Amino acid sequence: MRTLSPSAKPSLLTALLLLGLLANSAPVQAGQDTGSGNQKGGPETQRKGDEPDKVDTENLFGFTEGTDTGKKGEQEVLFDAIGRFSKRRDGPNRSGYGAAQPVISYQYDPTDNFSIEPGLWFDTRDSRNIVGVPDKSFGTFNGGSLELKYQFFKRTDDRPFSVALQAEPQYARITPIEGQGADVFSVESRLIADARLVPDKLWGGVNLIYDPQVSRLKGSGEVDRSSTLSVSGTLMAKLGKSVFVGPEARYMRAYDGAFLNRFEGHAVFVGPVLHYQVMEKGFLTLAYSTQVFGHDRDPDFADRAFNLNQFSRHNLRVRFGVEF
């Protein structure tokens, strides 16, 4: 076997030392941490696992809200309209019911996990020959709201789910079902959870909603207190680079009294949701739901198939927003 001469040994040792120094310094020059050699994948793998989900679920779903808030300093302008159609006819004559509450709002994110969204509410409706609803047709300014949302943590590869709390105090000038003039105060509160079920393909969301309401009718001064308790859930699948679709279901319970005092009826709604990312900072979400089951405790309607006293038969939501 061939051996190295004494003069070649120092040169070889020097070359090996230089190669070792270059290998150790390469990650530092590339702006990376070397980490410990006994950790599989090193810190780069850990950082990748901590990266937030690239899909923003805040407006991804239909009647269900997502947990996400924007990054610190981000702003957004939104148009959001929920329409309710078809209620129980009062007599043999032609009837019709349609009511919509468009909202124009501005969202600001003071931190990465907290958003503030004041909004202006409007009301437009047309009702005729409906049980318990006066005949009227008009459109007007309705009031305002302030939505506050806190997201406890972001979704990541290592933790693909998130939880948030949302509260939205509202003041309205018109009762939501009858369309009568009143001072209406409510605070819609939501416990929100969502998850990325299949990476880059499927997301799911669930909401638990409590909405107490106190109305003082103008003129008579009569006070009405009511509340609803709802659960909604949805699945959204990514069909292309900018299109998401999926089903949504909601279960809603109506009560007399602001604290769920007396159960009055319930209803189940199902329908599809479409979300389209119009551009990098703009989106359009469409959601439709129809009542497939309901029960009203009112003796006059207890034997009917649906609950059209506290709820309508069909709901439609259109939401559009632009971030900047």
Image: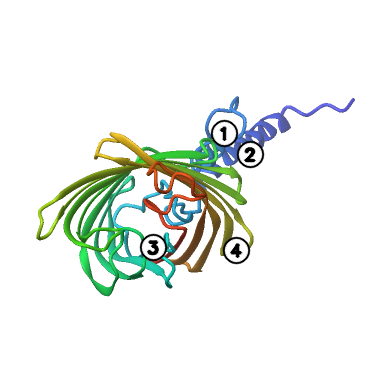
In contact (CB < 8 Å): disc 1 and disc 2: no
- Residue of label 3: 90
**Which is in the foreground here, disc 1 or disc 2?**
1
Q: Closest to the observer: 12 or 164? A: 164
**Which is in the foreground here, disc 3 or disc 2?**
3
- Residue of label 2: 19
Q: Which of the two labelled residues, at mark 1 and mark 2, occupies the earlier sequence position?
A: 2
| Image position of 125 (left or right of 217) | right
Q: Which of the two labelled residues, at mark 3 and mark 1, occupies the earlier sequence position?
A: 1
Query: Which of the labelled discs sits on residue 241, or is there none?
Result: 4
Q: Which of the two labelled residues, at mark 3 and mark 2, occupies the earlier sequence position?
A: 2
Measured Cα–Cα span from mark 3 to mark 4:
48 Å
> What residue appears at the point 57 percent right and 34 percent down from the top-left corner?
42
- Residue of label 1: 42
Measured Cα–Cα span from mark 1 to mark 2:
21 Å
Measured Cα–Cα span from mark 3 to mark 1:
71 Å
Q: Amino acid at mark 3?
A: Asp
**Which is in the foreground here, disc 3 or disc 4?**
3
Question: Element at badge 4?
Answer: loop
Question: Element at badge 2?
Answer: helix
Q: Amino acid at mark 1?
A: Gly
Q: Closest to the observer: 315 or 31? A: 315
